[in-house]
């Protein structure tokens, strides 16, 4: 990620579950002696520094929950009160462990002109659906999520699991490519202020984009990413 200038700013447990190792902004997937110091970055999303992880998630919730709740409700065709973001400040839930929508930052890089990474966000064997579902059904969390209004007995692991992208910058060429069931490539150009939702099992990729030395600041790509699981009439949204 250092070569490509790609970072995830925020908290969430699924990177750790996916790899079997904690994730950090400074060291990527590599373990190092400094992992125990909690001095890497406030954006470190690993479990060695639980207090720091919780504080970041709580700050993000305090500053962003109102805007994101309304935006996601509009995109999903529901009411704002039916959007549950992360732990929602419930005292029985660890905010950093539950997670919150995260920022994806792609810095300008020559390499992005040549990189195309078709992927699926939610392979059940290596991805997010099963861990997210298990998190909601965990006996230590279930009562708290029920108190937040989630009908955890009706959480859907299937086709309703949804990816949500909200671009905060839209430099030239910003958008998304995806593949239909027939294998046809479709393209969407991002518009500032819009939320793009699609099934998490959809094959998709960020298209390559040009590098301009004279306008590197303008070419920063910043996107809010989240994943939503429907539980009855409400949606639980995390990263």
Image: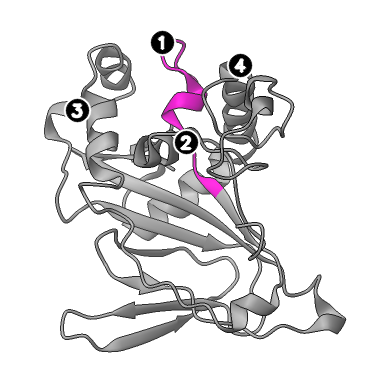
What is the CA distance from the residue labelled 4 to the residue labelled 2? Answer: 14 Å
Looking at the rendering, the stretch of residues picked out in magenta corresponds to 87-102
* Residue 85 shows in this picture: no
Q: Is residue 19 left or right of residue 151?
A: right
Residue 226 part of the magenta segment: no
Q: Secondary structure at mark 4?
A: helix
Q: Closer to the N terminus: mark 4 or mark 2?
A: 2
Up/down of 221 relative to 133, above or below? below
Up/down of 182 relative to 200, above or below? below
Q: Secondary structure at mark 2?
A: loop
On-image quarter of the N terminus: bottom right
Q: Closer to the N terminus: mark 3 or mark 4?
A: 4
Residue 92 tag number: 1
Give the labeled residue for mark 3: 152
Q: Is residue 118 left or right of residue 154?
A: right
- The x and y percentages for residue 154 are 13, 34
Is label 2 or label 3 in front? 2
Q: Closer to the N terminus: mark 1 or mark 3?
A: 1
Give the labeled residue for mark 2: 12
Give the labeled residue for mark 4: 51
Q: Quadrant of residue 182?
A: bottom left
Up/down of 143 relative to 189, above or below? above
What is the CA distance from the residue labelled 1 to the residue labelled 3? Answer: 16 Å
């Amino acid at each position: 990620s250092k070569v490509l200038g790609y970072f995830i700013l925020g908290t969430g447990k699924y990177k750790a579950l996916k790899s079997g190792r904690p994730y950090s902004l400074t060291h990527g997937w590599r373990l190092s002696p400094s992992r125990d110091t909690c001095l890497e970055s406030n954006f470190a999303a690993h479990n060695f520094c639980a207090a720091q992880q919780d504080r970041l998630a709580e700050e993000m919730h305090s500053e962003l929950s109102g805007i994101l709740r309304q935006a996601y409700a509009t995109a999903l065709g529901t009411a704002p009160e039916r959007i549950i973001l992360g732990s929602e400040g419930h005292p029985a839930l660890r905010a950093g462990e539950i997670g919150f929508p995260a920022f994806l930052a792609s810095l300008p890089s020559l390499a992005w002109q040549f990189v195309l990474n078709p992927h699926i966000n939610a392979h059940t064997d290596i991805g997010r659906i099963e861990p997210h579902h298990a998190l909601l059904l965990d006996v230590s969390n279930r009562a708290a999520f029920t108190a937040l209004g989630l009908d955890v007995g009706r959480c859907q692991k299937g086709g309703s699991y949804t990816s949500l992208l909200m671009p905060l910058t839209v430099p030239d060429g910003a958008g998304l490519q995806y593949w239909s069931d027939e294998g046809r490539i479709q393209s969407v150009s991002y518009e500032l202020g819009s939320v793009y939702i699609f099934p998490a099992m959809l094959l998709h990729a960020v298209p390559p984009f040009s590098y301009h030395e004279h306008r590197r600041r303008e070419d920063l790509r910043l996107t809010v990413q989240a994943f939503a699981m429907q539980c009855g009439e409400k949606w639980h949204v995390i990263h």
